[in-house]
């Protein structure tokens, strides 16, 4: 199932969270948790690449 999480899904999630005006630390915190899980999935060979790396987060949050 982890292989179904891709850039489009994560980007849509981030934009929807921004539209809901979540607290400034919420989006990068959750993104960090998802990214850590994706790093593990990549390390274990479940996915070829962590899709979180391309997702743009709100400007001051340090997104990649």
Image: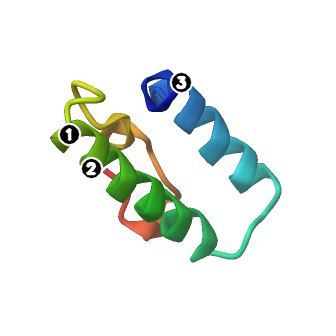
Residue at the spot 46% in from the left edge and 54% down from the top edge: 34
Residue at the spot 36% in from the left edge and 65% down from the top edge: 62
Residue 22 horizontal/vertical position (percent): 74, 67
Asked if the residue under mark 1 is in contact with the one under mark 2, i.e. CB atoms within 8 Å, the reply is yes
Q: Judge by depth and name the residue closer to the eye, 58 or 30.
A: 30
Give whichever of discs 2 and 3 has the lower sequence position: 3
Residue at the extreme right of the image, as rendered: 20
Residue 14 horizontal/vertical position (percent): 61, 47
Q: Does residue 56 lie above or below 32 as drawn?
A: above
| Mark 1 neighbour class, 10 Å CA radius: few under 14, some 14 to 19, many 20 or more | few
Query: Circle 3 sits in a helix, a strand or a loop, which is it?
Result: helix
Q: Does residue 1 lie above or below 27 as drawn?
A: above
Q: Judge by depth and name the residue closer to the eye, 40 or 27.
A: 40
Q: Does residue 47 lie above or below 10 as drawn?
A: above
Residue at the spot 78% in from the left edge and 63% down from the top edge: 21
Alpha-carbon span between mark 1 and mark 3: 22 Å
Query: Circle 1 sits in a helix, a strand or a loop, which is it?
Result: loop
Viewed as shown, does residue 64 lie left or right of 19?
left
**Quadrant of the rendered image containing residue 61:** bottom left
Asked if the residue under mark 3 is in contact with the one under mark 1, i.e. CB atoms within 8 Å, the reply is no
Viewed as shown, does residue 10 lie left or right of 18?
left
Q: Does residue 9 lie above or below 13 as drawn?
A: above
| Residue with the mark numbered 1 | 44
Alpha-carbon span between mark 2 and mark 3: 20 Å
Residue at the spot 46% in from the left edge and 26% down from the top edge: 6
Query: Circle 2 sits in a helix, a strand or a loop, which is it?
Result: helix
| Residue with the mark numbered 3 | 8
Give whichever of discs 1 and 3 has the lower sequence position: 3
| Residue with the mark numbered 2 | 40
């Amino acid at each position: 199932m982890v292989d179904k999480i891709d850039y489009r899904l994560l980007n849509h999630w981030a934009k929807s969270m921004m539209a809901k005006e979540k607290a400034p630390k919420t989006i990068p915190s959750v993104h960090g948790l998802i990214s850590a899980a994706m790093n593990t999935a990549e390390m274990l060979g479940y996915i070829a690449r962590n899709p979180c790396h391309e997702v743009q987060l709100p400007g001051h949050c340090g997104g990649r």
